[in-house]
Image (cartoon, rainbow, N blue to C red):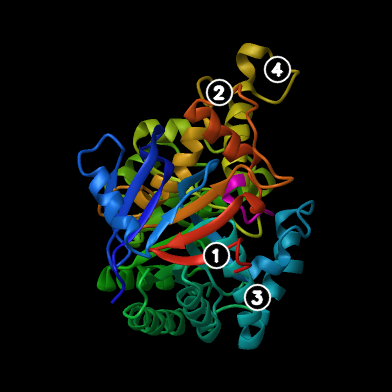
Amino acid sequence: MMNKQYFKGSLFHTPTHGKLEFIKDALLTVDEQGIIETVLAPSDERYAAELDQAKATTQLVELLEGQYFLPGFIDLHVHAPQWPQAGVALDEPLATWLEKGTFPLEAKYADVDFAKEVYNDLVAHLLSLGTTTVLYFATIHHEASFALAEICGQKGQRGLVGKVVMDLEGANPDFYRDASAKTAIEATEKFILAVKELGKGVKQGIYPVVTPRFAPSCSAEALAGLGELAQKYDVHVQSHCSESQWAHDHVIERFGKRDTEVLNDFGLLHDKSVMAHCNFLNESDGDIYLETGTAVAHCPISNGYFANSVFPVKKFKEQGLEMGLGTDISGGYSPSLYDNIRQAVISSRMLEDGVDVNVALGNRGVTDSRISVVEAFSLATQGGGEALSLPIGVLKSGYACDLQVIDTKVVNHRIASFGVFEAPEEILQKILYLATKENIRQVWVQGNLVHDKNEGV
């Protein structure tokens, strides 16, 4: 059995939303299961003795000057099969993007070898960007979707994987849809059981996810059956909710209710549910999210292309909703949560200031909408863990040891302050805005080293 591990270095995290904590020269002790036991500051009474003990082992990771620990990032919305499409046709209307690109691409995952090639590359790429946990949409195919779960397990990423359901005839292409609600529900149950069995042998955790693509693509029978499965097996649920004007209006026209109400009626909203986008939510919807414990996956880059709006992060955080960030590959072109942290701030400021100069300044935007980069950082870490109801995203006792090692002194990628901006929050701001893949030197998941730039891993 592996001995206790130790990590020594200055760290940044947000134990609660938007509240930054910096601990200089922190010492983390981590148990054999990869769970943080203690986080000690130099002023703590036990610090010196624990450090002496750590130095007497071969299990001490000690950072150099200019290096910092950040929590691993948590991506709440990735369409794994769309990785080959990232950056393609984003100047097209959504219908064109889906019909000419996405659906033909996702249909290719009937070929398991193709699926494995893409998924191996995607998981490794996300790990190299500091993303340690991902909530994945896969496709309608069992074998390919299960292969994604296996690859997450093999590469050391914490993966939550959903086999997609999209059965409604006329709403999906004939070449790519479930044959019926009955077969979709049966296949989902089979997938849940298989991934639960797989997860028993995976240290960092692999989880099955009930995944109706979204209400417009599913029959009422399928939505009801998936809700029953989610409750029967107490598993995570993911879907899209009120993403765009079309989707929002379509659900109201079809069901006579708002998207949130429909998903709730079918038993798909609970404490392990994460709904992507949610741009057209109102306060009444927010109340349902609060009552059920449902979380939002905010996808700021993707929203800029396909959501017809800016999601009001601050408004719904003040209402109390759980929320994290998603890249939404490939509706969002970038697999990096660093890029999405930046865009979350940019979008919030555009919402507050407005964008139409023909409207008077006082009427142009939505007052008090901007968020800080620390708040966006919270969404990528603490918020994501809270959304998934998992002990991740924070560096404290009882949480998984998921770490990024950030080096601000990499040649040609320096993140320098020149002796001017050296307060801890300023250092973090510069990291979040300026870090590249070269600055992410190591990534650890549940105490396991899964990416090492120094060794070319």
Secondary structure, mark 2, is: loop
Which SS type dominates the magenta stretch?
A: loop
Secondary structure, mark 3, is: helix
**Residue under pointer 3:** 118
In the rendered image, is residue 279 in sight? no
Q: Residues within 10 Å of mark 3 (few under 14, many from 20)?
A: some
- Is mark 4 in CB contact (under 8 Å) with mark 3? no
**Residue under pointer 2:** 366
Secondary structure, mark 1, is: strand
Tell which tag, 2 or 3, sits nearer the viewer. Answer: 3
- Is mark 2 in CB contact (under 8 Å) with mark 3? no
Q: Along the polypeptide, which appears first: circle 1 or circle 2? A: 2
Residue 433: quadrant of the picture: top right
Mark 2 residue type: Val
Counting from the top left corner in percent of width and height, residue 25 is at 39, 40
Q: Which residues are magenta?
A: 333-338
Counting from the top left corner in percent of width and height, residue 3 is at 29, 69
Residue 296 highlighted magenta (yes or no) = no
Counting from the top left corner in percent of width and height, residue 171 is at 60, 68
**Residue under pointer 1:** 451
Tell which tag, 1 or 3, sits nearer the viewer. Answer: 1
